Amino acid sequence: RTVYVNGEFLPEDQAKISIFDRAFLMADGVYEVTSVLGGKLIDFSGHLKRLARSLDALEMVNPLSDDEWLSIHRKLVEVNGIDEGLVYLQVTRGAPGDRDFAWPDPATCPPGVVLFTQNKPGLADSPAAKVGMKVISIPDIRWGRRDIKTTQLLYPSMGKMMAKKAGADDAWLVEDGLVTEGTSNNTYIVKGNQIITRQLSTDILHGITRAAVLTFAREAQMEVVERPFTIAEAQQADEAFITSASAFVMPVVEIDGATLGDGKPGRVASRMREIYLDEMRKAAI
Ligand code: PMP
């Protein structure tokens, strides 16, 4: 596989970064994951906008123009022959050459840029979407700026492992009795004609997929209600689902051992997945 590191396209086993890179030492970096369908990038402009927002929030400079980001993405997709898969991009505060809590002067410490692809055949036609996911709930003990997409992913990773050990697929995070989001996705419940999902704030990541799905939901005459909900309310809902750039729309059929409805993926979730994939394929670049 060919990867991109600081201006160069290289075979992955020849790519090198400094041991002083601040993302390695301090998770001082941000990232984006864009899905690829039919060899094309899904919602790429949304990911670039959020990248700019994350960089801004951490007073980091965007090292590349939107056109440069696009051409690197396209080149990696092409050379690695990705039909369905993902492109991961990471921007770090760079490698100052020593370890220090204070940030280096950006004039003397250029950002670190790493991109790679992940081949995922069957990403869109996922068997998991036909079965639905089981989730457990765990306390949300993450930091207070979850709207910044940093590489600080230890707790989400622990949450995934807790879910696995419990025989589930993922964990929903709960703070003050209310669901914030999933370990790596935004969370929704469906009641009648309403799609309910937590409102945007610093408490959750502003999902690119969330924004698109809510637009499509409104166009499909669903009522979108942006408010938090409890696990108990979710367990009583008609349906539940999650969204993310790599899972698209994925139905949830069990929450903390309680089966939703008949235990099959819900009608609204399945329809939203279909609409999302159709519309995003059309707009892919
Ligand atoms: N919340 C968290 C914590 C995430 O890690 C992700 C995936 N990056 C999302 C939500 C979904 O965001 P997106 O739709 O932009 O992938």
Image (cartoon, rainbow, N blue to C red):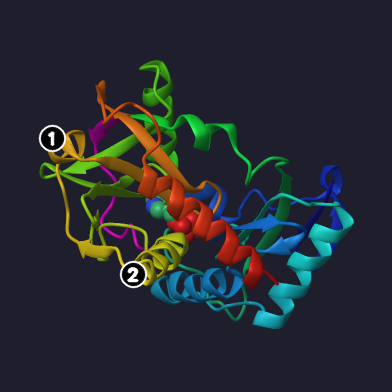
Q: Magenta stretch containing residue 278, yes or no?
A: no
The residue carrying mark 1 has its beta carbon less than 8 Å from ligand 1: no
Indicate the amino acid at tag 2: Arg
Nearer the observer, 111 or 264: 264
Q: Alpha-carbon distance for marks 2 and 1?
A: 26 Å
Could you classify mark 1 by the number of other residues whose Cα lies within 10 Å: few (under 14), some (14-19), or many (20 or more)? Answer: few
Residue occupying the point 74% across, 65% down: 73
Can you say whether 139 is above or below 87 in the image? above
From the image, tell me which residue sits under label 1.
232
Contact between labelled residues 1 and 2, with CB atoms less than 8 Å apart: no
Residue 228 located left or right of residue 246: left
Indicate the amino acid at tag 1: Ala
Residue occupying the point 77% across, 50% down: 16
Can you say whether 173 is above or below 188 in the image? above
Residue occupying the point 84% across, 46% down: 1
Magenta stretch, main secondary structure class: loop
Residue 21: percent from left, percent from top: 60, 55
Q: Secondary structure at mark 2?
A: helix
* Mark toward the start of the polypeptide (2 vs 1): 2
